[in-house]
Amino acid sequence: MKAFATMAFAAATFASAAGADVSAEFPYERHSVDVLGSDMAYVDEGNGPVVLFIHGNPTSSYLWRNVIPHVADDHRAIALDLIGMGASAKPDIGYTFQDHYAHVEGFIDGLELTDITLVLHDWGGSLGGLYAARNSGNVRAIVMMEAAAPPALPVPSWDAVPNPEVRATFQAFRDPVQGPQIIQEQNVFVEGFLPSAIMRELGDAEMDAYRAPFPTSESRLPVYVWPNEIPIEGEPARNVAVMAEISEWLTSSEQPKLVLYADPGMIVSPETAAFIAASYSNVETRFVGPGLHYIQEDHPDVIGRNISDWLRDRVGE
């Protein structure tokens, strides 16, 4: 699709500045916990205050593999796989935002995690943001990057999506006929969108890791549902309400917040970061370098060091 070509051109333009020595290795033992009758997989490294990493679509804990070491030196770094994604089970559910949220909340309860710092990306931004809004007393701090959360969401109209090719792509993703064909049958979200939203070229081992959870059309249902959960032009209304709840917490809560952003970004541009700096409460914004959406694949060390330094200097023990 033309949007992927446009993003690939942007990636090539900035590739020389992106991280060149990003490891494909995933040197962590995966654990599992029963949540609502299904196993959820997770990584659990280090000791100390809890830092919970939550990914989005179509990734997994693998996205955080090179960020975790920076945090696990003096924190307990936990990275989950959302239900139906990564190494987690694929129960027969709808995979709506609300389904995912119930499993995230159940995961936190199941591991009895307390005083949590949340590190969030993509849909992890709204899942973690809603958890913070509803369980503020259990959230110590929050870190967000390229988060599907306010002010980016809800989207008031399709005209508000500035890139016409990206707009057309997501309209196709949400089409009841084209969407399943593109995402479930052709696996375009994994094979096309994901690599086109990273500055450097992913190696075979990295692509294989991202493909592994979705070998069949049926297994890709969660990937297909996620674009349909984006609140655009008031629908789905239940997620418009979610974003209002998250926005209220982000703009009024006392907990320290860190927003990491790239240029040009896809959800959080430098201009959006400036708006966030003026609207979130108790927030700091930091630039990590050139990047599109999956910035952990371009700048994991910069991201990891920023999180680690901020936790030490701003959040404390």
Image (tube, rainbow, N blue to C red):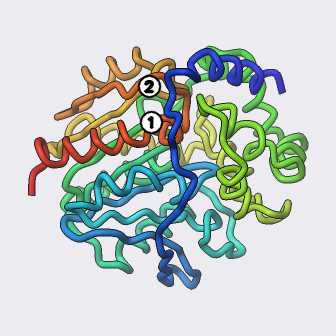
* Residue 225 visible, this orientation: yes
Please state which of residues 250 and 317 is positioned toward the viewer in this rendering: 317
- Residue at image location 47% in from the left, 19% down from the top: 263
Please state which of residues 300 and 276 is positioned toward the viewer in this rendering: 300
- Residue at image location 52% in from the left, 50% down from the top: 23
Please state which of residues 30 and 172 is positioned toward the viewer in this rendering: 30
Q: Residues within 10 Å of mark 1 (few under 14, many from 20)?
A: many
- Tell me where residue 264 appears, x and y as whole percent: 51, 18
In primary-sequence order, the first of circles 1 and 2 is 2
The residue tagged with tag 1: helix, strand or loop?
loop
Left or right placement of residue 203 versus residue 239 in this view? right
Identify the disc placed on residue 249. none
- Circles 1 and 2, Cβ within 8 Å, touching? The answer is yes
Residue that mark 2 sits on: 262
Residue that mark 1 sits on: 299
Which label sits in the foreground, 1 or 2?
1
- Tell me where residue 232 appears, x and y as whole percent: 61, 32
The residue tagged with tag 2: helix, strand or loop?
strand
- Tell me where residue 31 appears, x and y as whole percent: 48, 79
Left or right placement of residue 207 versus residue 60 in this view? right
Query: Is 241 above or below relative to 15?
Result: below
* Quarter the N terminus occupies: top right
* Residue 249 visible, this orientation: no
Amino acid type at circle 1 is His
Query: Is 67 above or below relative to 268?
Result: below
Q: Quadrant of residue 88?
A: bottom right
- Tell me where residue 22 appears, x and y as whole percent: 51, 44
- Residue at image location 24% in from the left, 40% down from the top: 257
- Residue at image location 68% in from the left, 37% down from the top: 195
Amino acid type at circle 2 is Ala
Left or right placement of residue 8 versus residue 299 in this view? right
Q: CA distance from mark 1 to mark 2?
A: 10 Å
